[in-house]
Image: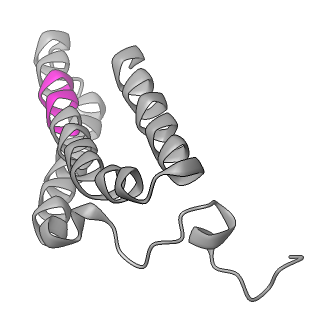
Amino acid sequence: MPHSESTDSESSGHEHGHHGYISEKDAYLKRLRRIEGQARGIQNMVADEKYCIDILTQISAMTSALESVALGLLNDHLSHCVVEAVAEGGEVAEEKLKEAKDAIARLVRS
């Protein structure tokens, strides 16, 4: 590691001490734990050789839950990180806007 004193957030260009989702962190963690449980449930369904359509229905529910988390995080990012960066202006604003555009493109493709 060339810069042992830098943190992961610094090395990836994300220098803020907290992020827009921090006020909803517990709710996000609860939702992600529920999704994790859904994934285990789907694994059990496959192991127990449940009906294909029932498994696909659960996968669809889990996908919707993940999309909901992603959209919430995106909204928090736009409302907090991007708004701060735009207020600062310059290269920081351009970088945050590009990050947001790229994240939206990834979500749309998925």
- Number of residue marks: 0
Query: Is 61 contained in the magenta span?
Result: yes
Q: Quadrant of residue 25?
A: bottom left
Q: Left or right of 87: which side holds 91? A: right
User: Looking at the image, which residue is at 17% across and 60% down?
Assistant: 28
User: Looking at the image, which residue is at 48% across and 30% down?
Assistant: 102
Pick the residue in front: 11 or 30: 11
Residue 32's x, y, as percent?
Answer: 21, 55
User: Looking at the image, which residue is at 29% across and 52% down?
Assistant: 83
Pick the residue in front: 2 or 87: 87
Q: Quadrant of residue 97?
A: top left
Query: In the displayed structure, would residue 21 be above or below residue 98?
Result: below
Kindly give the residue lying farthest to the top in the view shown.
53
Q: Left or right of 84: which side holds 71? A: left
Pick the residue in front: 79 or 27: 79
* Image quadrant where one finds the C terminus: top left
Residue 29's x, y, as percent?
Answer: 20, 64
Q: What segment carries the magenta color?
A: 59-66
Kindly give the residue lying farthest to the bottom in the view shown.
5
Pick the residue in front: 35 or 102: 102
Query: Is 19 contained in the magenta span?
Result: no
User: Looking at the image, which residue is at 15% across and 29% down?
Assistant: 64
Q: Left or right of 68: which side holds 102? A: right
The image's colouring method is one colour
* Image quadrant where one finds the N terminus: bottom right
Residue 30's x, y, as percent?
Answer: 12, 63
Overall secondary structure of the magenta stretch? helix
Query: In the displayed structure, would residue 39 be above or below residue 57?
Result: below
